[in-house]
Image (cartoon, helix red, strand yellow):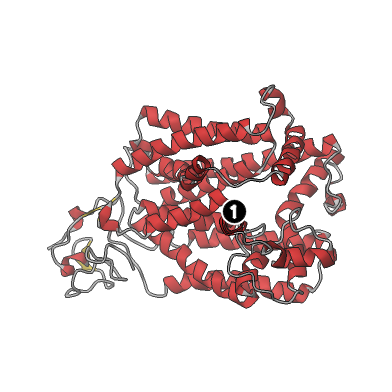
Amino acid sequence: MTVTKQFNHPRRPNSRGLFAPLVLAELYLFGTFFLFWITSLRDEAVGLGLLTVFVVACHLALLGGYLFFFRKPRLQINSFEPPIAMMRWVTAAAVLWSVAFWAQTYRDEGDTSGLMHRMSSPGESYLMRRELFKEHVDNLKPVSRLGQLEMCASILSFCLPVFGILIWTRLGFILKGGVVFALAIIAVVALATGTNEPFGHLVMLVSSALLIRRYGFWPAAPKPAGSARRNSQLVIAVGVVFGFVVFMGYNLENRLNARRYYDPRANVGDLASLDFLPFEVREALSHELFYPANGYCGLSYALQMPFEWTKGVGSSRGIQGYLKDYLGVEGILERTYPFRAEKIYDWPAGGYWWTMYPWLASDLTFPGVVVFMFMLGWAFAKTWYESIRLNDPFAALVFTVIFFTIGFVPANPQLLMLKNEVWTEFGALALYCLPRTMYAKIKPIRRSGDAGKLNNGRVNAINPPGRRSAIFEGGYTAKNGGRL
């Protein structure tokens, strides 16, 4: 007896796409380290041998953790239907929250007049924002209860692009318009404040959701042939990334034109082979190269420092803020690797990047960071697998969080730096820990022997007859809620 009709997949299960995020992550991480080596930053770094060994060890640990999850073949037999109705409601709430949050962010910038002027002069807007930020830090007060509630809902900032893309064809006209409007608000605020971060965040969120959509089995309305659909998603992803790079270059050039913001460590001489370009363009490009590569210089300084434990919260300035506000605990930040190394090597802990590693090492030690990267790789593979093979929306959220974290490895532990971002990370993990049977409908499989019969009765060796209630390798069953 065959059970092929029980599964609404357009193609039979296989290993296609299982290693796509790993390839992207490793190319990105090794690419940023390569940029460090081809720029003049390598001349400022110390202990290049130790730096190279540590960075390569972390990247290989990520690779090892990912491959460890797939040490046994895992072929999907999907038995869960994604909770479309629930995802629609969450997307609607995310639209409302995002519009309110980013509108408030824009109002907090001070002068809200001349929106078009601020969008066309991001350099001046950025400088004004830096001054306001310094003033805000000098007069910092504990967050109000209303503000705290707003932070607790920060997970919605990830739900907006992720859920919106995954179930785009099931949203309806009004909700689609709301998603587009909310994303446009984020883009306008990024332009008007002259900051790269909102665009960078949006690029990573959209890219991760498109990646899941490309390789997953998420429900959709009638669509063109598979290759045409996948190509369109690839074009969208490339267009989003290219748009971000162009905006960042324009933004940096505009800052340079103001001549009040110039980073002397960004060496235009690194682009001597491009002397046919105008000097202003090469100046902006030198800053674009400096952005993803300068953290490795800071890391080389941190690797020379002795370990000093930061009580498990040195990597999270957001949690440190809560400890200071409610328990009066201070002085942790000054014991982290970046702030101690800053006093010796004159590499500003709050001005330049240090990569994510020394912040984590303040709690875990540098060998512990290598172990952490192995665990991160394992979680990266697990959530990716559940996103594309089980249609689990909360696994997709956690995958996006990990994708986002890896994207900021050359910079800092971004999701632990601010209070609202801490809530985003822990909110995604809390939702992921819910039993899948609470929100997803299970398609019953009458006999485990039937689960292995696909494609005219060919038995899947991963699920041999007689394995009780096994949906696939790893023991995903209705009894345990679908978890490994």
| Residue 347 picture quarter | bottom right
Q: Is residue 258 above or below residue 55?
A: above
Q: Is residue 79 left or right of residue 385?
A: left
Q: Is residue 98 left or right of residue 38?
A: left
- Residue 73 shows in the view: yes
Q: Nearer the viewer, residue 152 or 7?
A: 152
Q: Which residue is tagged 1?
A: 325
| Residue 281 picture quarter | top right
Residue located at (37% from left, 51% from top): 393
Q: Is residue 286 left or right of residue 31?
A: right
Q: Is residue 147 above or below residue 10?
A: above
> Residue 95: horizontal and vertical position, in percent?
45, 35
Under tag 1, what secondary structure? helix
> Residue 334: horizontal and vertical position, in percent?
72, 64
Residue located at (42% from left, 75% from top): 71
Quadrant containing the C terminus in the rendered view: bottom left
> Residue 317: horizontal and vertical position, in percent?
62, 57
User: What's under tag 1, amino acid-wise?
Assistant: Asp
- Residue 228 shows in the view: no
Q: Nearer the viewer, residue 198 or 288?
A: 198
